[in-house]
Amino acid sequence: MYKKQELKADNLNLKTQKAKEKADDYYLNKHILSGFPKYQVNGMNLQFLMHDKTLAETQEDYNDFIRSCPDTSLTNQLRRAYDKLLPFEAGKNIRESGLMIADSLHLVKGSDRKYILLFLSTREQGLPAPSLQNALDFKKRLESEGLASIVQLELYSKFQSNNAKRVKPFKAISDLQIEELRRKELGTVTILMREDGTILHRQFTNWQFDPSPALEIIQNDLKREDESFNDFLKGFKEGVLGTLLIAAIIGIAYYSRVKGKQKKERNRRRIRELELRAIRSQMNPHFIFNALSSIQNLINRSANQEANKYLIDFSRLLRKVLATSEKKLVPLSDEIEQLQ
């Protein structure tokens, strides 16, 4: 404490602060202390911060403490506190917390535009008068802000029967519920949730019903876009894009296939044309005509033996030309024989 006061005296920023927050205290202890006292004090401070803030806000300091603290008794204690608070984090559902009180809240599935502010007090002597007055002021504030129809105030506490009219916003909390909260090491419980049970904010320290945080959270949540509609639009867009992508792939594949067939057909025709040209280049039409005319002339002159020999040679030549026209390469001996 002496060291902290010394730092505050030397530091203008710390000196002008009216009240030192737990977060500031945590970082001061982290730099001033060492050894076991450092981890013992900061472990306690972290537990307080985890109750007062969200786990997401203290996650970095929590990880640093678990990683650096060599004393397992302190780290296990902090882990238990973390696991205890995890079901109450923003985005979780109150049903997952296992609290008995969840069955009394009349949660409406799918309703995310109405809200429930749950406040549980385990004080045996009931709430002090200032807290009671703050609760009534908060209810009036909801009415003035036009939020009374969408925000349901669920306040449970111990109170005397003769104060029933005064504490109208409150409901009697059962001994079983108090025992459950104490078993879970939870004192004063404040949870702001949507009517479907989705938790928006929670606090486990003594919150004196300052309406500003809750109202600000509700108003910001009301301004958000409809998640289900956004999910629908997102799914619709993804579906349309997916369908268009599949259609484009099918179209490209079909186009490529058709173009491939057309190209193959063009190549086939080109080959046929080239084959015919090759045959024509080897067997000139005039040569064929002249050869047949010569054979006809021999037959007309009754030179049957010569005509027969001429016809055999001519047929062998035609066969060789047609056979070699389908090949890219032919033996030299075949070429010489064909020329002879």
Image: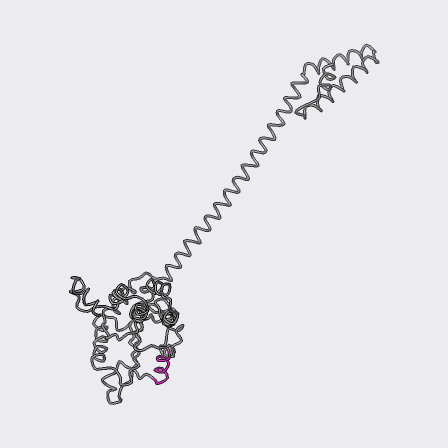
Pick whichever, 170 or 11, lies toward us: 11
Tag count:
0
Q: At 20% from the left edge and 72% from the top edge, which residue is drawn?
A: 144
Task: Report the quarter where the N terminus lies.
Answer: bottom left
Q: Position of residue 275 (x, y in %)?
A: 64, 25
Q: Position of residue 21 (x, y in %)?
A: 23, 68
Q: Quadrant of residue 222?
A: bottom left
Task: Report the quarter where the C terminus lies.
Answer: top right
Pick whichever, 186 or 43, lies toward us: 43
Instruction: Please provide the residue range marked out in magenta.
Output: 174-183
Pick whichever, 213 or 110, lies toward us: 213
Question: For the view shown, which residue lies furthest in the front direction?
Answer: 35
Q: Quadrant of residue 295?
A: top right
Q: Position of residue 330 (x, y in %)?
A: 69, 22
Q: At 75% from the left edge and 12% from the top edge, which residue is drawn?
A: 294
Q: Position of residue 81 (x, y in %)?
A: 36, 72
Visible residue check, residue 51? no
Visible residue check, residue 10? yes
Q: Is residue 166 left or right of residue 55?
A: left
Q: Is residue 257 left or right of residue 166?
A: right
Q: Is residue 330 above or below residue 34?
A: above
Q: Is residue 121 above or below residue 61?
A: below
The main secondary structure of the magenta stretch is helix
The reply to whether the magenta stretch includes residue 138 is no
The reply to whether the magenta stretch includes residue 178 is yes
